[in-house]
Amino acid sequence: MLQQYEKLKKVLSSAKKIVFFTGAGISAESGIPTFRGKDGIWNKMKPEELANFNAFLCNPELVWDWYQYRKKIVHEASPNPAHLVISELQNYFDEVTVVTQNVDNFHNRAGSKIVYELHGNIEKNYCISCGKRHDFENLVVGEKVPKCECGGLIRPDIVWFGEYLPEDAYSLSELAAETCDVMFVIGTSAVVYPAANIAYIAKRNGKILVEINIERTELSGIADISLIGKAGEILPQILQLVKEEKSYGKN
Ligand code: BV8
Ligand code: ZN
């Protein structure tokens, strides 16, 4: 592991643009359950039962309630040291971009400035009829599933299975993967597509891939550096490393 850190220190000393590609594992230490781990939420129910548009049409209350429940967990939790370090690293590199599959809004709450949310954001909603955004205001409360003034059902602004990812977020993420110096892949099983492509795009463009995970994944075989451990413990060590190499403020 020490050798991996030495290698990482060298890579970071000359790096200018960093991308952090994150998944549910980076929020695990905030108390947010992951999807596929042993305590994963997909073990209790199948994605197709809840995280898809048909499920919402068939049973809007069940799906709406599930997201309200997850939003409550997110509101009672906070970004952990992993999110906070990623935000702090913005002071040591020319550009720090976050590409996240998570919908928990923690990277924004931690102060990261460039955040591309490939699967949406649990704080955002829109009307399925007229598309109007309903991020809290003018929700026709009282009814189980809020309705838009036009009468349409309001849904979470989250990308469900079988739905396209937001065009701008995905293309900007591809560009970041093609133009960065180093990509950190943190807390993802890398089984969901097209999001997982982002790591392969970086690799195809000859970027250094650094994986941080508590276990090996589909990506471990192509990672240049693989740090096994909790993101909330490893990221503060990486910040320490950077502070030894770079001074605060744009380098
Ligand atoms: C699409 C939002 C085009 C919902 C999510 C076969 C049939 C049908 C579809 C497909 C298929 N094959 C491929 C597909 C496409 C499908 C897909 O990829 N399915 C997979 C499951 C096989 N993808 C789609 O449907 C996408 N859309 O393809 O559109 C299209 C359009 C029309 C018609 C056809 C195609 C949309 C995918 C988005 C789905 N939405 N979430 C919600 O959140 O409620 S996916 C869900 O998985 C989350 O967003 C999550 O972010 C994402 C990825 O999971 P991870 O983040 O990696 O989390 P996971 O639990 O898996 O892993 C956690 C990791 O952390 C583990 O490795 C663990 O070891 C590690 N860890 C744990 N603790 C720590 C840690 N690491 C570090 N520190 C710790 N402390
Ligand atoms: Zn509407």
Image (tube, helix red, strand yellow):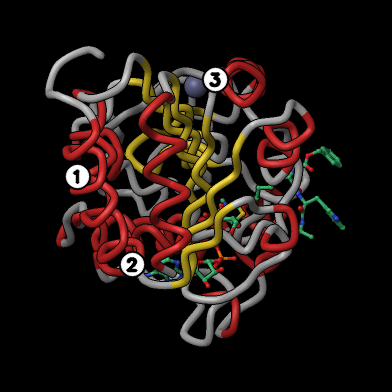
How dense is the environment of label 3, judged by Cα within 10 Å: few (below 14), some, or many (20 and up)? some
Q: Is residue 230 visible?
A: yes
Quadrant of the rendered image containing residue 108: top left
Residue type at mark 3? Gly
Image coordinates for residue 37, horizontal then vertical, percent: 54, 79
Identity, as a three-letter code, of the amino acid under mark 2: Ile
Q: Amino acid at mark 1?
A: Leu
For disc 2, the marked residue is 32
Rendered location of residue 137, percent (x, y):
23, 26
Closer to us: mark 1 or mark 3? 1
Q: Is mark 3 within 8 Å of ligand 2?
A: yes
Which residue is more in the foreground, 185 or 57?
185
The CA span between labels 3 and 2 is 29 Å
Q: Where's the C terminus, which quadrant?
A: top left
The span from disc 2 to disc 1 (Cα, nearest Å) is: 16 Å
Front in this rendered view, residue 190 or 212: 212
* 245 vs 110, nearest the viewer: 245
Considering only order in the chain, which callout, 1 or 2, is on the residue closer to the N terminus? 2
Earlier along the polypeptide chain: callout 1 or callout 3?
Answer: 1
State the CA–CA distance, disc 1 to disc 3. 33 Å
The quadrant in which the N terminus is found is bottom left
- Quadrant of the rendered image holding ligand 1: bottom right
Residue holding disc 1: 84
Quarter of the image where one finds residue 231: bottom left
Which of label 3 and label 2 is nearer to you? 2
The residue that mark 3 highlights is 131
**Which residue shows up at 73% across the image and 64% down it?**
218
Answer above or below: position of 162 versus 61.
above
